[in-house]
Image: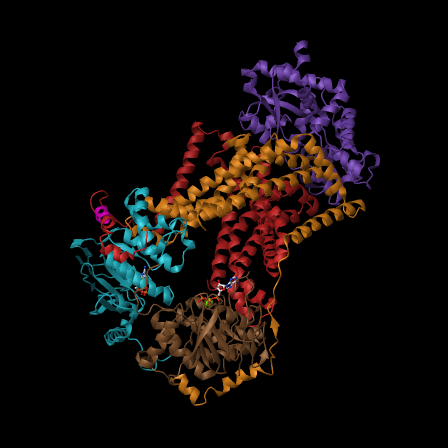
Chain colours: A red, B orange, C purple, D cyan, E brown
Amino acid sequence: MTLTPPAALARKGFFKAPLALFRRGASAPRPRVVRRLPVERDWPVAAIVAVQVGILVVAIGTWEIAADTGWIDAFFWSRPSAIGETLLTFFESGRAVSDTLFTFRSTILGFALGTTLGAAFGLSFWWSRNYARIVQPYIICFESLPKLALAPLIILVFGIGLASKVALASALTFVVSTLTAYAGVKAVDQDGERLFYSLGATRWQVFTKLVVPSCVPWIISILRVNIGLALTGAVVGEFIASEQGLGRAILYAGQTYEIALVWVAVMVLSVLSITMYVAVSWLESRLRRGVGQ
Amino acid sequence: MTLTPPAALARKGFFKAPLALFRRGASAPRPRVVRRLPVERDWPVAAIVAVQVGILVVAIGTWEIAADTGWIDAFFWSRPSAIGETLLTFFESGRAVSDTLFTFRSTILGFALGTTLGAAFGLSFWWSRNYARIVQPYIICFESLPKLALAPLIILVFGIGLASKVALASALTFVVSTLTAYAGVKAVDQDGERLFYSLGATRWQVFTKLVVPSCVPWIISILRVNIGLALTGAVVGEFIASEQGLGRAILYAGQTYEIALVWVAVMVLSVLSITMYVAVSWLESRLRRGVGQ
Amino acid sequence: GTPLVVAEPVHSLGYLPLYVAIHKGFFAAEDLEVRVMTIDSGSGHTNAVLSGQAFAFIGGPEHNAFAKAKGGELRAVVNVVDRGNVYLVAAKDIVVKDGDYAAALKGKAIATGFFGGTPNSITRYLADKWKLKIGTDVTLVETANAAVLATVKTGKAAFGVTTEPFLTQGVAQGIWGEPIYNIPKELGPYAYSTLNVRASSIEKEPKQVEGFVRAVAKGLRFTYEHPDEAVEVARKEFPTMPAGDLKATLDRSFKDEIWSHDGTISAASWSTGKSVVMDAGILKQDVPYEAIIDMRFVPGRAAAK
Amino acid sequence: MEDVSVTFQTADGPFHALAPVTLNIPRGRFVSLIGPSGCGKSTIFNVVAGLQSPTRGRVLIDGIDATGSIGQVGYMLQKDLLLPWRTVLDNVILGMEVRGVPVAEARDHARPYLQRYGLGGFENRHPGALSGGMRQRAALLRTLLFDSDVILLDEPFGALDAQTKAQMQEWLLKIWTDFGKTVVFVTHDVEEAVYLSDDIHVMATRPGRVIAHIPVDLPRPRPRSVVTTPGFVALKQRCLALLGHPADEESEAA
Amino acid sequence: MEDVSVTFQTADGPFHALAPVTLNIPRGRFVSLIGPSGCGKSTIFNVVAGLQSPTRGRVLIDGIDATGSIGQVGYMLQKDLLLPWRTVLDNVILGMEVRGVPVAEARDHARPYLQRYGLGGFENRHPGALSGGMRQRAALLRTLLFDSDVILLDEPFGALDAQTKAQMQEWLLKIWTDFGKTVVFVTHDVEEAVYLSDDIHVMATRPGRVIAHIPVDLPRPRPRSVVTTPGFVALKQRCLALLGHPADEESEAA
Ligand SMILES: Nc1ncnc2c1ncn2[C@@H]1O[C@H](COP(=O)(O)OP(=O)(O)OP(=O)(O)O)[C@@H](O)[C@H]1O
Ligand SMILES: Nc1ncnc2c1ncn2[C@@H]1O[C@H](COP(=O)(O)OP(=O)(O)OP(=O)(O)O)[C@@H](O)[C@H]1O
Ligand SMILES: [Mg+2]
Ligand SMILES: [Mg+2]
């Protein structure tokens, strides 16, 4: 087939058929349905909160009633009223505060340590591609390994005190921070580096003035994930060996059938984690504003 | 001060001072150092692998020698030779294969289940902003909660068989998948939606033809993370209750102080996790190519 | 029929007669298939039985008492370990003069298991017996059983209350010497590890329970009669345990006669166990023997009646 | 053929993005909208396409009220918005697919157009493999094959380099001649507007409004060299003057 | 003042991105490079800035061999590359900071320039708050305050809309007049090249090479209206012809 300019083809009537098809498409076989743009109106905050509270109330109510009627075995599951009483006792006995503080302390220390060291390690990969390539498989190995499997060894090394909990919390946060910071390093704008080098910058200048600041948003983005991981590490550390802490409370409660206490400890843990989550979110938004992003 | 066009100012000699400063800057006070662009040559793959193996060999050698000389307490740390023997026994006794397969099975099931359900849940948020806002705090709560704290309850619900391990593995992967898919949903190009609506599309069409495909890369990106989480879940599930599996081997070894066996189980676990990691990475690159990205 | 699951809190040489009964086909002879599952989360093994997922668990009958307090009905049907299978050890340099344990322990720290576990309760029981007030006179370092070794080794505690195989390992490593207080010997019969089933199992499936108990009793007898073959079974169950540790542990167990000979739980046995947990404050109210122990299937008894 | 009459104020606070604006666009014409950034050109398009509801006023298409209804006109946004996971062919048939035409039929229908309009051989490639010009062509074909009588183009060539842009202009004119649709075109490039259009509407900002209607009476087809003819230059100068463009005076910085 | 002589082939396989190219750029001139995409304009800049080592050939600045040495010339890449975490002021002093000037001193030095070149009041804002034109101005100031005698500008106004572009051109000319530096300018817009330059070098592709040197002898200062004078139009046409631009003939699609 020889190439004919399409305009010429059209003039020759060659396009009649497809054009006709166009017309047809517009009319009979698929009538055009007139639709309006789907628009969802945002509910006011009060309505949202009301629904959320409502869901909670209904869930708790159902649980209590189900426990009353025996549909749920309160022996295994406990019941809201019993949990409420236990919660009171837990706070009155003064354990609540000391346990929470203990868990909070290991969490925060592990969080800070793991995030800082991990981020620094991840940033160090910028300095040499070969170094990064050599170290990478070891990191992947450590990442994909369930760190909790190392728990028995951690006690050996770090003892049964605060250090072991902090170590577990750090171990969990370290790798994630490393990988994220490394992803940040890989995403550093090549043209930015070129700009710096065109100005005659040294590698150290490029690192401090370009690489570190551009990785800050990446490191910030990991804070929220790390808070959960650090908490897990601290709690598991307490499972293994501890004199106090919420993890120990859960372990103890499990051993003596105090299911209500398990729930209470889990609840306090949730409140703790949400508090930290909110704090980190706030920090995050502050930091992000700080770098003008 | 009245505004004078700068060009006029320059002509009036107003700029003499700063221009003089420019000149000075170029000469005396900060002599311009002539630098070359720092360039790193990539090593050949063989060299990289050689260094990696070298590091391993040196580390193992040092360990063995340190254990011999008593610098490291072999009782707490075991030693490479003892670990080697235990590895052999572990494989000869036939436990190795069945344990690995058992752990592998719960991991894969939990991985598939958690990722699929989580992604579907995350995608569902596209349908209604209000629904997303209502559900969000619950998800955050569940995310930041150490799922392991729920271990005592998990047996009650899912029993002591495969289901409890799969449930833990799914629980760990579910939230991450949900949040990632939701992040994908939020990143869906608004203009893409406008394009679809300008064509008169229904919401279902926008969902299947735009939202789901554009979230696929997000969901793929989570696979690698999830494999580690699913493995953690399965292992912890075996910590809680199990007849076999690598987690049980670690638990047993920790309970009876067979440090060499801890190392062996951790090693087998690493190999398993790296194998899955590589498989998922391969799958990821295939999928990415599939969507042309 | 379907396999019977026996939940164990830890895979331990202490349960050797149970493994012997499995390996020697005593359950098979009763037409039962028994599988052992490790369940290590607090009351997990008890819950597994209560919720019907496991047929029996091996552990102290005090768990039946705890469950009873919350409305769960469990019965100990056969005894396995009839001695308080824990030992008080001391760091190498410590000597106890004239059996005056109170003086030796005063002002020191004792490493023991978690609160709620039996080693912990026995420690509290002993402290009480020796009139030592916990917190003021002695400090308890409560930790995972395996970590007692590390705690004593690192000098964080001068004494330890520990179980096998840690005792043997600690001796071999020179972390501590031979036990300074042999609890199995000193406390005498102690319902330490019994096999416990749901009360409803006894009512609904008495034949099954009977066969199960008979097989366990056979395992107990076989263990004492053929120690060499029992050791062989142990080796199969614990393939990675260093042979020396395994032998030393079993030697001590045979020497201290920790296992019940016929499976009977005596009244004295339970009263020791009960006073330990009540002293520790874990069991809040007295539970009579009959409420949690049912010996009707133990062969010797049945014959006697 | 078409009578778009729009009068509205957007609802974002008391901000009047568009003062009442009335535009009348006859069937089959090539009409350009030019104006400074933020004068509401894209807003007009959104209203016509039904993606934004006007605070007041109506949109009439073929004399029928089409205010707020979607799927009535072809709208090509400034970005090409090709879906990266679809092949070029499947991108082009998107409009038909959404309307419910079976995929196989839509593909058969679209294939000859790809062939004829310079995308032959790329049907089964993904958009990532296309150059900027080819991407714009695919996006334009998608808009055309949606088969509406009116096509709105929002700065389709803004991101192209000068040479590609010239090629695309020729191509657009050819398509327009072939299909005979009504085209409304937004651009920042005055030369482009004059070269392509039958009519130019000049807009001003704060509030957005149409300040002039300039018919372009240059004969078609127009050779490239038309840009240097006095008639063309005069039209261009007039548009630039209306836009308040610095024409001769030394402009002040900032 | 400056004598750049470049002869090289890039090392990417047997691909000759640049055939031996020799350019001689006299001190203080405003020189433009134009040419089709991929002809090696950016590559030349990279070589001159020391970011890419030539396979063969040398770069001479002020007669001294500067091949492969960085920090000798001011180089403004096509993207503005303002660091989003720095204020506008701190972005502008980057070059001085890298050279070791104390930050406080550099800031004091830079502040009056920001004031004078239309960024007054934005010193402590972050680049995100600037319009495209202001960002380009900040990037250009950064390059100027780096205080090198030679400035390379790679399509600095490519991404701006037509009106802003015209403003920026005036501004660049003023800066150039004030500072008296040597400027090498890359653009795709022929009109821009002719309007701004003293000399135009036209390049061709495969392999990249200079095919013509066109001196622009229009008197300065040039009013905007110069674009319609016959002299200007003739130069523009000549450049377009050299670029193989479709001038009059109907260009074929695809
Ligand atoms: N959703 C919105 N909320 C608030 N203001 C808006 C919104 N959409 C548009 N505007 C404002 O309306 C005005 C007109 O916007 P529009 O996008 O129509 O301008 P435009 O002429 O297309 O500009 P450009 O040439 O830059 O594309 C702008 O000032 C813009 O800031
Ligand atoms: N690092 C590289 N590896 C391989 N090829 C390259 C590399 N850098 C540039 N090229 C090739 O060299 C040629 C010249 O590229 P260059 O960026 O200099 O072109 P240009 O004239 O600046 O184009 P444009 O106008 O699009 O910016 C191109 O064909 C490009 O593909
Ligand atoms: Mg617009
Ligand atoms: Mg370039």
Q: Position of residue C226 (x, y in %)?
A: 76, 19
Q: Residue most toward the left?
A: D63
In this view, the residue in front, A232 or D225, is D225
- Locate residue C10, reporting x and y percent: 65, 31
Query: Does the image show residue B179?
Result: no
C150 within the magenta span: no
Main SS of the magenta part reads: helix
Q: Is residue E254 above or below residue B95?
A: below
Residue at the limit of the structure toward the bottom, as seen here: B12
* For residue E212, above or below residue B130: below
- Front residue of this view, candidates C154 and D19: D19
Occupied quadrant, residue C170: top right
Residue appearing at x 59%, y 59% in the figure: A123
Q: Camera-side residue: E54 or C299?
A: E54
Q: Say which quarter of the image contains residue E227.
A: bottom left
The residue that appears at 23% across and 67% down in the rendered structure is D201
Foreground residue among D88 and E91: D88
Q: Which residues are magenta?
A: A20-26
Residue A54 x/y as whole percent: 38, 42
The image position of residue E213, as x and y in percent, is 44, 77
The structure residue drawn at horizontal position 24% and vertical position 59%, both measured from the top left corner, is D177
Q: Is residue C289 visible?
A: yes
Q: Is residue D102 left or right of residue A131?
A: left
Residue A22 lies in the magenta stretch: yes
